[in-house]
Image (cartoon, helix red, strand yellow):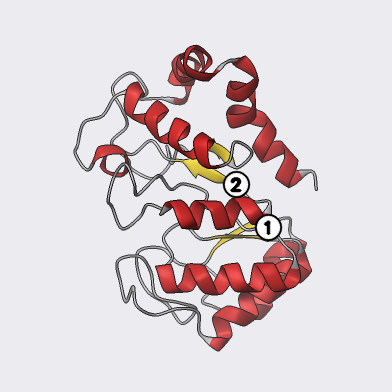
Amino acid sequence: MLDCDPALLKQIAEAGARILTLTWNNASKISGSCVDEPYRGLSELGKGFVKNCAALGVLVDVSHLSEAGFWDVAAISRMLNTPFIASHSNSKTLCDNPRNLTDTQYKAIARSGGVVGVCLHSAFLNNTETSTISDVIAHILHFLELDENAVGLGTDFDGGITPPTGLETISDLARLYEALINAAGETVADAVFYDNWNRIFER
């Protein structure tokens, strides 16, 4: 949408945009993606985008980004003391998919003050076309063991996903909420569903 144009980045920030995903599945002038040129990190243009996002109050989203690009973002985040996020990514420990995050990546986002939104796409939950609420809970609990303040939801209901059985629409999220209460308690469920994301947007 921005055609990698810094002037358009400033324009959308002034219009109220607060999250920027650096790539989709296709590599761009900014960086390689997790599936297209995954070895390539941020270009000089991409590093400028990340720094401009920090100056403009826009959160950088590393979902879809190459791992090399991820660590470039993490380095700039440390330098500028700004959080970054993965809006819809799961645990690579539980599901070895290019779109998912290693434990080390998750911890880097947590250290920055950012949030990882657990995605409801079956392929990112168990590498199949079918999944269950239990698969979602497993990813949430794994991330909670690493850092309980950095887990949120990133359903991707607008992304043409194959959702878990019983979580086909946003109205079904009440089932996930109850399941998470049973697994980890109401305080944790509230953090995952509301509080962790609220914290980063209210900073």
Residue at 55 percent of width and 79 percent of height: 46
Which residue is under mark 1? Answer: 83
Kind of residue sitting beneath label 2 = Val
Residue at 22% from the left image edge and 43% from the top image edge: 127
Report how far apart the C-alphas of labels 1 and 2 lie in the structure.
8 Å
The x, y position of residue 195, in whole percent, is 69, 31
**As drawn, is 135 to the left or to the right of 116?**
left
Q: Where's residue 32, x and y in %?
A: 39, 75
What amino acid does circle 1 point to? Answer: Pro
Q: Quadrant of residue 84?
A: bottom right
Answer whether labels 1 and 2 touch (C-beta < 8 Å): yes
- Depth check, front residue: 27 or 127: 127
Decide: few, some or many residues near mark 1? Use Cα within 10 Å; few <14, some 14-19, many ≥20.
Answer: many
- Residue at 44 percent across and 36 percent down: it is 142
Looking at this rendering, what residue extends furthest in the front direction?
A: 145
Q: Which mark is residue 115?
A: 2
Q: Is residue 102 visible?
A: yes
Q: Earlier in the sequence, mark 1 or mark 2?
A: 1
Q: Judge from the rendering whether residue 130 lies leftward or rightward of residue 156; answer left or right.
A: left
Horizontal and vertical percent for residue 53? 69, 68
Q: Position of residue 16 (x, y in %)?
A: 73, 55
